[in-house]
Amino acid sequence: MRNSDFSLPDLMASRRNEMGIKIAARGGSISVNILDELYIDEDDLDTEFGALPGQMGYWAILVGRYERLVSSMERAFKNWYAGKYQEMFDILLKETGRRPNINSVEYMVLNRCKEEYNKRQEEIEEVKADFYTIKTMPFALNSKQQCLTQIAKRHTLDWEATEPSVREFPRSNFTTQKSSNKEEQLQHSKDVFSKVRNKGD
C-alpha cells in the first residue's frame, strides 16, 4: 500500500507500537506512549494549555533522573569489572608465577564472566536508549506548545471572521466541548445555530 493511501491518523496509529517506552519508577516501571504525550486535542485547547506545564516539568525531571541512572549503572559496571579483573589477575599470577599482561587478564574476564558481562552491558544500553528518547521530549513539548499557540490564533481569527450576530453568543458555545460521542457534539452545534437563526428572524 502506498503512503498516500494512509490518512494521518492511520499513519500515527501504525507507529503507535513503536512509540511506547517503559520508564523506571519507584517500585517498578510505568508504560508511557510518546504519541499520547504529544497528541493535541483541538476540541479542548484549555485543557491542553493547562496540562502542558506539568508535562514539561515531568519530562525535565525524568531527564535528570535518567542521567543519574545511566551514570550510576556505568559506575557500578566499572566497579564490577575492576573486581573481576583483580580476581582474574590474582588467579593468573598464582598459576603462572609471573605478572600477567593486560590482554591475558581481560581475555580471562570475558571468557569466565561472559554471561554476566553481556547482561550488564545490555541493561546499560537499554537504559541509555530510553534516556536518549527522554532527552528529546522537552524539545518535542516546546514544539507542541508552538503548535497549540498557532491553533489558538487560528481559532481566534475564525471567531473574529464570524457574523456579528453569531459572536453575540458566548464564545464557549462554539468551542467543541468534551462529550461522550459525536452525536452530542452535533446536537450542540445544531442548538447554537438554531438560536442564531431564530434571533435573526
Image (cartoon, rainbow, N blue to C red):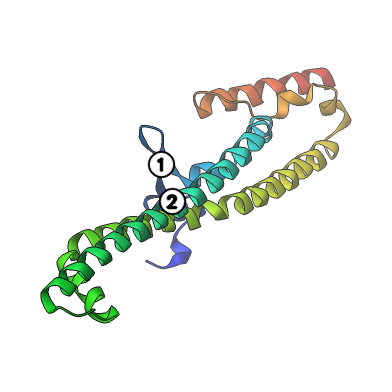
Whether residue 201 is visible to the viewer of this picture, yes or no, is no
Above or below, comparing residue 122 to residue 146 in the picture: below
Residue 56 in percent (x, y) is at 62, 41
Q: Nearer the viewer, residue 74 or 122?
A: 74
Residue 24 is labelled as 1
Q: Residue at x 41, y 56 (%)?
A: 75
* In this view, the mark in front (1 or 2): 2
Judged from this view, the residue extending furthest toward the right is: 164
Above or below, comparing residue 170 to residue 128 in the picture: above
Q: Quadrant of residue 95?
A: bottom left
The answer to whether residue 167 is left or right of residue 4 is right
Label 2: how many residues lie within 10 Å, few (<14), some (14-19) or many (20+)?
few
Label 1: how many residues lie within 10 Å, few (<14), some (14-19) or many (20+)?
some
Whether residue 139 is visible to the viewer of this picture, yes or no, is yes
Judged from this view, the residue extending furthest toward the front is: 97
Residue holding disc 2? 72
